[in-house]
Image (spheres, rainbow, N blue to C red):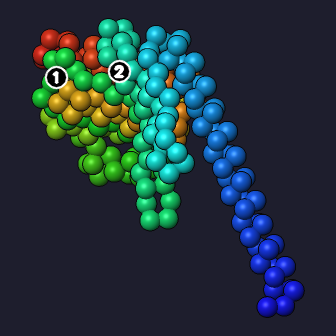
């Protein structure tokens, strides 16, 4: 092997090591930012906080949990891995004390969602012009879906959707509540708004069955 080949290999290995170092530094800094922001948010909202643990390849995610407005909430993140990429999501979850027997999903309206609504893919139009424009709703039962999506919950959903990034979705599955969106959220306003959705949904299911939604 000539000197030129050796030098080329050394340069190649050095570039690889430098790229890995930059990636590791960026990932470590991002994780530090998440830790600080989530720890501070948990302290401000009176939630318990558990930091991420493990190494680079078996890392857990940080979690927060506790009571907000008498509603027990849990906040964490998860990763959806594809063949060539991975996508992180933030989620806020809770369980209704007296669940309604209905499945409801609310997603931020997109061009595709708007076209779907025009051809009947949207199950519910609530008669709330701003909400109906911003959200696509699917429900297994129209009456119970309307009971769940009362005015306070619709308002909370709209405030959250305005702050949340892409792929924002709310789901209620027979009492299992979940609010999730793409990315690991650092903004306290978005986290506050997501928690408010879960609390509002808990209040909605406590309404008398068959009561008007407005």
SS assignment at label 2: strand
The label shown at residue 73 is: 2
Count numbered badges in the picture: 2
Q: Nearer the viewer, residue 32 or 108?
A: 32
Residue at image position (59%, 25%) is 37
- Residue 77 as seen in the image, left or right of residue 185: left
SS assignment at label 1: loop
In terms of image quadrants, where is residue 171? top left
> Image height check: is 148 above or below 81?
above
Q: Residues within 10 Å of mark 1 (few under 14, many from 20)?
A: some
The label shown at residue 203 is: none
Residue at image position (48%, 32%) is 62
> Image height check: is 22 above or below 53?
below
Pointer 1 or 2: first along the chain: 2
Q: Residue 144 in the image: state x and y as whole percent.
A: 16, 26
Q: Quickly name the residue at label 1.
A: 99
Quadrant (top left, top right, bottom left, bottom right) of the N terminus: bottom right
Residue at image position (53%, 11%) is 44
In terms of image quadrants, where is residue 98? top left
Quadrant (top left, top right, bottom left, bottom right) of the C terminus: top left
Nearer the viewer's eye, disc 1 or disc 2? 2
Residue at image position (52%, 45%) is 55
Q: Residue 198 in the image: state x and y as whole percent.
A: 35, 22
One can see residue 6 in this view: yes
Q: Residues within 10 Å of mark 2 (few under 14, many from 20)?
A: many
Q: Residue furthest bottom?
A: 1
- Residue 184 as seen in the image, left or right of residue 69: right
Q: Residue 142 in the image: state x and y as whole percent.
A: 17, 32
């Amino acid at each position: 092997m000539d000197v030129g080949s050796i030098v080329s290999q050394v340069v190649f290995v050095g570039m690889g090591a430098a790229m890995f170092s930059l990636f590791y530094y960026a990932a470590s800094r991002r994780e530090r930012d998440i830790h600080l922001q989530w720890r501070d948010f948990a302290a401000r909202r009176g939630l318990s906080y558990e930091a991420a643990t493990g190494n680079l390849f078996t890392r857990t995610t940080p979690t927060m949990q506790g009571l907000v407005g008498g509603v027990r909430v849990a906040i964490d993140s998860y990763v959806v891995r594809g063949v060539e990429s991975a996508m992180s999501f933030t989620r806020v979850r809770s369980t209704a004390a007296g669940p309604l027997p209905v499945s409801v999903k609310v997603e931020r309206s997109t061009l595709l969602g708007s076209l779907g609504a025009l051809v009947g893919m949207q199950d519910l139009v609530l008669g709330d012009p701003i909400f109906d424009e911003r959200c696509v709703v699917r429900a297994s039962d129209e009456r119970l879906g309307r009971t769940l999506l009362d005015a306070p919950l619709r308002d909370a959903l709209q405030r959250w959707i305005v702050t949340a990034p892409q792929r924002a979705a709310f789901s209620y599955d027979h009492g299992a509540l979940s609010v999730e969106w793409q990315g690991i959220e650092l903004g306290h306003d978005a986290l506050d708004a997501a928690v408010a959705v879960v609390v509002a949904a808990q209040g909605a299911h406590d309404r008398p069955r068959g009561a008007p939604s407005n």
